[in-house]
Image: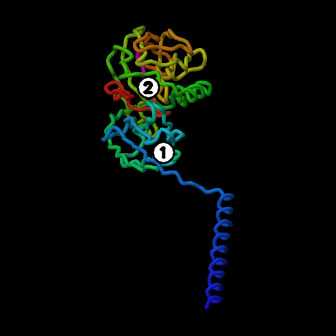
Amino acid sequence: MTTKTQTINLQGKLQRLGVNRITKILIGILATVPVAVSLPVQALEVEILPKKARLGDTISVLIELESQDQPGIPTVAVGEQTYPAFEIAPNKYRSFIPTTPLEKPGVRKVTISGEGQRQRNMAVYVGDRKFRIQRITLPPGKAGTQATEYELQKVKEFKALQTPEKYWNGVFLTPNKGRMTTTYGVRRYYNGKFANDYYHRGLDYAGAAGSAVIAPAAGRVALVGTVSQGFKVHGNVIGIDHGQGIISIFMHLSRINVKEGDIVKPGQLIGAVGSTGASTGPHLHWGLYVNGQSIDPMTWKTKTMD
C-alpha cells in the first residue's frame, strides 16, 4: 500500500514538473515575439454646410477629430477629386468643395478619412438652378480675341494656388460701386449654337472708367499682368490669393496700384476700372475661385465662410 502511494505521488510530481517546464517555455517564446496592439479607431465628427446647396455654391466640410493624439490631416474626396483640408482650430479642419453650372444637380458622395480615424461617407444634395441665357450673334468670319500661351499659363498657375495661410476674415466686400450688369453663371448661345463649356465666371460691374477697384478681402497679390505682357483677353489684371484655395481675379483694368507680393487689406485701393483686353466697354469683371473652380461670389458677400 505504501509503495503504491509513493508511486502515485512521484507521477504527480513529474506531471507538475512537466507543466511548469512547458509554461516557462511558452513564456519565453512570447517574450521574444512582438505582439501587435490594435489601437481603437477614433470617430470623425463631420458637418456639411449649407444643408441645401445649389449649383454655383461653395460647400463647406467641417471636420473635428475625436482625439488630439491622432496625427495627420483628414482628406476629403468627391469621386476621384480630392480637396485640401486646413486646420482652423485645434483638432478642427475645414475643406471647401466648389460647384459650378457645368455640373449636373443631384447627390454628391463625400468621403472623409484620416489616419487612425474611422472613414465617413456622407451625402450632400446639390439642387438645380436656372441661369440666365444670352444669345450672341457674331458676323460671318469674325474671330474672337484669343488668349496668348503666356497669359493662359500665368492664369492657370494662379488659379491652382492652395496657400496654407488664411488671409480673409468675414464677408467679402463689393469691389466696385458700379451697377452689376452681368451675374454669375450666365450661359450663351453663339449663332444659335449652345456653348456647352461656357458660363460667366464672375460678376460684372459697370463702373465708370477710372473708378476705384478695391480688395474685397485681405490677401496677397499673386498675379499682376498687363496688355503689354501679352494679356490680350484679361487685359490689365490683378489676382489676389486669399489663402486656402480661395482667389480673386480682377480684369480689364485701366490702372494697377499694387505689385506682386503685396499684402492687401479689405477695402484697399488696388486699381481702376477700364476696358482693356476682351472688353466692349468700361467695366470690372470680378471672379472668385475655390480650389480652381469659379463659384458664385454672392454667397461670399452675404455669408461668413470661415
Q: Can residue 193 be seen in this view?
A: no
Q: In this view, does 119 lie to the left or right of 11?
A: left
Residue 45 x, y percent position in the rendering? 39, 43
Q: Name the residue under label 1.
A: 77
Q: Which secondary structure lies at badge 1?
A: strand
Q: Can residue 157 be seen in this view?
A: yes
The three-letter code of the residue at mark 1 reads Ala
Q: Quote the CA–CA distance across marks 1 and 2.
A: 25 Å
Q: Residue at x 48, y 45 (%)?
A: 77
Mark 1 or mark 2, which is nearer to you?
1
Q: Which residues make up the magenta segment? A: 282-286
Q: Which residue is drawn at 42% across and 19% down?
A: 217
Residue 217 — which label?
A: none
Residue 240 highlighted magenta (yes or no): no
Question: Which sits in the foreground, 303 or 298?
Answer: 303
Residue 173 x, y percent position in the rendering? 36, 18
Q: Which secondary structure lies at badge 2?
A: strand
Q: Is residue 258 above or below residue 134?
A: above
Q: Mark 2 points at which residue?
A: 287
Residue furthest out toward the bottom = 1
Residue 170 x, y percent position in the rendering? 37, 22
Q: Which residue is drawn at 48% across and 38% down?
A: 68
